[in-house]
Each structure stands twice: as C-alpha cells, then as structure tokens.
Amino acid sequence: MARSRGGCLNCKARKRKCDQARPECHACTQRGMRCQGYSTPLRWVNGVASRGRFAGASVPDASLVATQGPESNQDLLSMDSETSSAPNHDTSSTASGSISSSAFSPQAVGVPSADAQDPRFQRFMNNGLNRLYSTEASSWIKPFFEQMAYQSPALVMIAGAIQLYMDDGNRGMSVKSMEYTDLALQTFRQELSARYERMHLATICAGLLVCSLCLLQTQPWTKYLELIVDVYDLRTKLSTVGQISNDLHTQHLLEVLGVMDLPSSVIGRVNPSIGVWKLFRRLQDDRDEGRATGVEVVSGIPRSLLDIFASIMDNDPEYTETRFWDWPGQVGESLQCHYWECWRLAGILEVRRRRRMERKARGLFDREDGMSRKGPDTEVVLCRLISSIDALQKAFEEPRNQHLLVHNGLPYAVVNAGLEVPLLKQHPAWKATLDDVRNSLLGTDSFDLINTLFEMLDEAWADGTNSFDIEGAARSRNLELAIF
C-alpha cells in the first residue's frame, strides 16, 4: 500500500499508509475505526492552559480527534455534579441552513454528554457570565446562553472551564480544573469537526468562549477568531446578501466576533484585524432595515461609536479624531453616558498615541498635539478622561447602579490614560484616580489578564515617556491582552 499525502484524516494524523478507498479506507476498517474521510482538516494551534501539565495543550484540531475512555470522561464530567437529562431542544431554528437537530446530539458527534444543569455551568450563568459583558445583568443574554447550552455540549463544558478558572482565582488552576479544561477542549474539537461544514450558532458561541478562556489567561487568542472566520467562510458570507440570517442570535454572535476583532480591542495582537465589524455593518446597509442602532451588549458601547473604532486604522489620524469629536452621543443611563465618554476620549488618546509611535518609528520628532485643529491638547483630553473615569467609578459603587456591568469595560480607558505618563507625573491626583480604579479591578478580578495589564502600565511608568511601546512589550512575552 503506497503512502499518500491525500489519505484520510485518521491516516494522516497517525502517519499511516492509506489506500483512499471510499467511503472508508481499508486501513481504518481493519483497525475497527470510523474513517474520518478526506475533507480538509481544521487547523487549531496550541495553547490554552497557562501553567501545569496542560500548558501548551493542543486546541481543537479536527484532523486529530483525541479519543478518551468513557470512564475517565465520566469521572471528569461528574466532578462535583450529578448527572441529569437535558430537555430535548430543536437546534434547527438557530442554525444557519437546514440542519437536523439529531445530527448534533452529543452521541452523534461522539462527545461526552454535557448537562446544562451541571453546577459548574450554573455557576457560570449566575456569576461568570456577568464578567464577560458590559451592559446589564438582567439582559436577554442569560436565556440566550441557556438555549445555546442545550444545542452544544462543548459550550456547556467550556463555560464550566471558565468558571473553574475564575473559582481558582489567585491560587492558580488546580489539576482538576486543568483536566476538565482539557476535556472541554477535546469536546469542542469533536463538535467542530462534526459541524464545520455548516454554520451552527451554538458551536460558534462555544468557539468564542474558547477565545474568552484564552484571553482571561493572556494566552494568544486572535488566531482562533481568524480560524472561526475561515472555517465558516465568513468573509464571503458577510460580503454577500442573503448568506447570513437576520435573527437576533446571529446578529449577536457576529457582533461579539466583530468587537473582539476590533483593532483597539487587543494589545500585542499577533493576527491582524479581519474587519468583521465593518463587513457586518456594510451587509446591514444592503438590507431594508439598515444598520442596527442601540448598544452592543458585550462592550456596552453604542454601535455608532464602535463604527468609528472599527475604522481607526483606515483613515488619516486627524479625520478619525474629528469623527470622535463629532460623535453625537446617545441617550442612556447616567453611568452609561460616563462610560461612553470614557471610551470616546480614550479613543482620541489612542489615535494620538498611534501617531506618536508611527512618527517615532520613522525617526521623526513629534509635534506637540498639533494634529487636530478641532480638539484640545492632550492634557485637556486626559483631564476630561480622568474626570469621566472618576465619575464612573464613584457612580458604580452606588446600589442603584449595580445592575449595570460597565465597570467590566474600564480597562480600555484606564490603559490609554495610563500610557500618558509625563502628564500623569505632572498631575499626581490623576494618577491617584487611576490607582483607585486599579485597586477596585484587582479586588474584583484575579484574572491573569487584569494583573498583566497593570504590570505593563508599571513598565510604562518606569519608562517615563509617552511613547512606551506597550504593543512590542506584550509581543515580546507572547501575550495578547484584551482591553474591551
């Protein structure tokens, strides 16, 4: 039997000879294995666990579907939980295209049956989920996740893995948590290998949670966004009217993908921004109802303001800054308005910082804030930003605002303010305000992400300039830091 580069996925993975027989090759038949066929394998590259025995463990690769004995799977699935049956929900209503719900049952995709009533998942729904959004604790997101959970065993398990990471806190991930995370990733790998030919919302949602699990640990994660886009050919679908459903759930997941892909969302980005937000908004332009308005629920930012952030790298800096100044705003609760002002002013500082870094790379002297005829100098912009951060921080502590989650989105404003080191040294009270927010965030979250962000700001402070290369510092450590 000749060795072939075009063998089935099993033979390729095991580097065995394959006769490429259809529908199943003889090598798999003789070994009593189910032949995985000859389609193009999905390629997921390394690393979710940040420490311990699973550091650098492979993230889903459909051509390398790992098999695990039922006993070890059941041991991990039953860890602090009791098995119960999930209601039978039809998945076809939220899948893009005509897809049978039975085809995506846990038994059909060969993965452990995850239970949406599992205590880990329920803790995530009641606690961890609110750490990933910046809108309201009482929004429609929780029912959405509950519906998706009955359609995706991988989503249930990855959400549980995120919650275990949060539960472990400063102690670091326990061995049990790492083992459960590894099993969750295997489950996602197998689920994606069964569903990748057609766009399935629950599996996309599970993939975005994989990104969240990575980013909370400061592990590189934008490559997974790019893979999701490539697997489902979203560049083509988002450029063609009629290829994407117009329902609320599809819009939400594409907007989440778009927000995570924004140029401003990541420090130390390895993979360039794909432009998902811009593609999706242009697609909406071609529909009768036009662009969606209101607030995007992950970032908590009005969609019209996110449109400016999506194009922050596309235009002349002065034009982009003018767009920020001209943004008309939106009606919202007092705390939300402070939050939006934080992002708008931080966006202006980001535009100016990017210009400073670009001129520095070219060996040019940076003129002192002369780039915009319309806006004030950077000291005034920073003063207004610090005032908005201080107002938001104080208002957030009031009981009447506890239903709002905008505090989760403060890192973007704090990072951009914290990089204006010379001005902060001139105004110690401004630095004290940022330190108060730092203590508040560190007191609430023990994520690697939050700790590492402030370590980077400490390096910028020690550097003493307003041109500290935080992007390069993150890349040198192989970190991608989410700040949305």
Image (tube, rainbow, N blue to C red):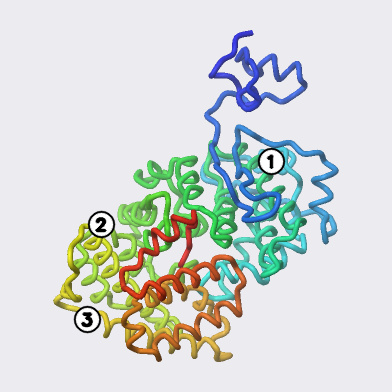
Give the quarter of the image for residue 70. top right
Image coords of residue 69 (percent x, y) = 81, 38
SS class of the residue under badge 1?
helix
Q: Quadrant of the N terminus?
A: top right
Q: Is residue 153 visible?
A: no
The mark lying in front, picked from 3 and 1, is 3
On screen, residue 109 versus residue 423, left or right, reads right
On screen, residue 254 versus residue 196, left or right, reads left
Which residue corresponds to mark 1? 102
Residue located at (55% from left, 91% from top)? 398
Going by the numbered disc 1, the residue's amino acid type is Ser
**Above or below, comparing residue 101 to residue 459 in the picture:** above
Task: Answer few, some or many: residues within 10 Å of disc 3's Cα (few below 14, many 20 plus, some between 14 and 19).
Answer: some
Spatial CA distance of label 3 from label 2 is 23 Å
Residue located at (51% from left, 72% from top)? 134
SS class of the residue under badge 3?
loop
Going by the numbered disc 2, the residue's amino acid type is Asp
Which residue corresponds to mark 2? 314
Going by the numbered disc 3, the residue's amino acid type is Asp
Which residue corresponds to mark 3? 377
Spatial CA distance of label 2 from label 1 is 45 Å
The reply to whether dot 2 and dot 1 touch (C-beta < 8 Å) is no
Image coords of residue 238 (percent x, y) = 38, 47
Give the quarter of the image for residue 131. bottom right
